[in-house]
Amino acid sequence: MSANFIAVCGLPRAGSTLVCQLLAQHPDVHCEVHSSPLCNALLGMRRMLSDDQFLLSQLDRSFEAAYGHLQTGMQGFLRGWYGDTGKQAVVDKNRAWLHCVETLLAIAPEAKLIVCVRELGQIYGSIESQHQKTILLDFMDHLADYDRFGRADMLFAKDKAIGAPLISVHALQDLPDAVLQRIYVLRFEDLVDRPRECAAHLFQWLGLGAHAIDPARLSVGVQESDSHYRMKFPHRQHASIRKPDPHPIPERIQAQIESACAWYYQLYYPNKGQTAASAPPGAAGTGHAR
């Protein structure tokens, strides 16, 4: 029997590496923690085959059979990727899963997605703080020459590090209920405040057996390469969980973020300033948590 597929995605600096590290503690889960090329490969396969003249010809002559070949072929590729794990569930981390949720479910109907979110000012602050530590290196998309406000504005552009996945998070509300039931939105603040409770709730939602984690003694896997990101988005794993200190954000930048992304705060931070401990795990429970 194929392992259940769990995709981890979401916003940058929102805890996806930590979520994967916690999932990897479970004995029935295979999780390599670092980012995977699987989603990119499947999307590339779709683009390539959609332009293939032989497949297009078969679709004209026998759509059902040809489309069936396409579906089973992509299913076989996904299943084969982790075919030797022998675990109940496999975890694949890639931010791209966030904008192709329905494509994934067409290939693996049992799949579930964990979407990591965080207060947006702190996401920007985390990126800016790391940039100041590596200021002699430019970003992949050349943002180092901007001032702080300009860099924040660019990071939230629709094709940039925060803006691109943020558009996909916004689009979640347009999905049908059956799809939303496969999605678990997890706030970073809840995760670092109450890791035991969040992990237990997450394991239950994923259909895994109960397993207690010790936030002070976590196993650490292979560290992900950060040079690809020009050291601006570190993916460090740690042996224990420590709540990070808040990043100081200029008032003008924070106000601009909250104004431009009011929908986000209404959905996931309706009482900004409320302590994370007052909200349930997953920001509101199972399924499409808010």
Image (cartoon, rainbow, N blue to C red):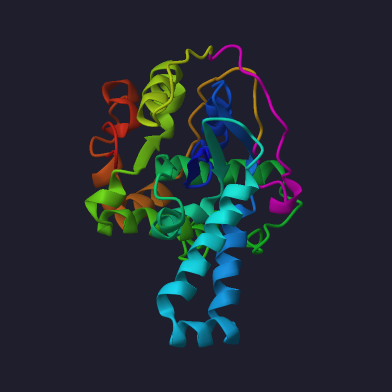
Q: Residue at x 53, y 11 (%)?
A: 214
Helix, strand or loop: magenta stretch: loop
Residue 219 within the segment the image draws in magenta: yes
Count of labels shown? 0
Residue 163 within the segment the image draws in magenta: no
In this view, 53 is above or below 47: below
Q: Does residue 161 appear in the picture of this structure?
A: no
Q: What is the x, y in percent for residue 121?
A: 43, 44
Q: Does residue 99 appear in the picture of this structure?
A: yes
Q: Nearer the viewer, residue 260 or 96?
A: 96
Q: Nearer the viewer, residue 171 or 12?
A: 171
Q: Nearer the viewer, residue 220 or 238?
A: 220
Q: Residue at x 71, y 49 (%)?
A: 135
Quarter of the view holding residue 260: bottom left
Q: Residue at x 66, y 40 (%)?
A: 234
Q: What is the x, y in percent for residue 85?
A: 64, 34
Is residue 262 found left or right of 134 in the rendered image?
A: left
Q: Which residues are magenta?
A: 215-235
In this view, 71 is above or below 289: below
Q: Residue at x 69, y 41 (%)?
A: 133
In this view, 133 is above or below 264: above
Q: What is the x, y in percent for residue 212?
A: 47, 12
Q: What is the x, y in percent for residue 259?
A: 30, 54
Q: Nearer the viewer, residue 45 or 288?
A: 45
Which quadrant is home to the C terminus? top left
